Amino acid sequence: MADRNPRTVEEARAFVAHVESLFMPWDIPALLAGFTDDCIVRFGDLPEFRGKAALEKLFRGRSERQRDYRLRKELRALMGEVIANYWEGEWEDRMTGAKMIGRGVEIWVMRDGRIAVWEAAFNTNRAGKPSAMGLV
């Protein structure tokens, strides 16, 4: 990890690819190293939380529940210290055995080469099932 923010689209794309690689398999120490100690996380419908201890709890909970997690992230934008990406994922829910899919967007506000603010909006659903919105 560099100690400076990505400055070019190529550097931002490489950073997003690096983060993607850390989720398969779950490399929690390396993921945490990519965040500032005072990080702010706004993840889906969870209440906002701060700091690596809370973030580690999120990552450990997800890693325990998501078997065979496969993730694809794609850079969408770089503007100053902000990186936006789109992601799609697939996994098996360890509790129910259901095949799951998800997709979403993330906004990362970077500081000194690490994520200082992580905002994530996403949808998940059982694979092959109609959307909860009834549109598909």
Image (cartoon, rainbow, N blue to C red):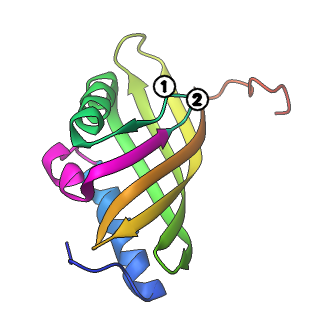
> Residue 102, percent across and down?
55, 38
Q: In this view, does 24 lie to the left or right of 124?
A: left
In what quadrant of the picture does the N terminus appear?
Answer: bottom left
Q: Name the residue under label 2.
A: 127
Tell me the amino acid under the disc marked 1.
Lys
Please report the residue visible at 31 percent of the width from the left and 29 percent of the height from the top.
Answer: 67
Disc 2 crowd, CA 10 A, few/some/many (<14, 14-19, 20+): some
In what quadrant of the picture does the C terminus appear?
Answer: top right
Magenta-colored span? 24-42
- Mark drawn on residue 114: none
* Most foreground residue, 5 or 10: 5
Q: Name the residue under label 1.
A: 99
> Residue 25, percent across and down?
23, 45
How far apart are the alpha carbons under marks 2 and 1? 5 Å
Tell me the amino acid under the disc marked 2.
Ala
Q: Please tell me in which quadrant of the rendered image residue 60 appears.
A: top left
Picture layout, residue 107 above or below residue 93: below
> Residue 126, percent across and down?
58, 24
Q: Which of marks 2 and 1 is nearer the N terminus?
A: 1
Residue that sits furthest to the left in the current view: 29
Regarding mark 2 in the picture, which secondary structure is present there?
loop
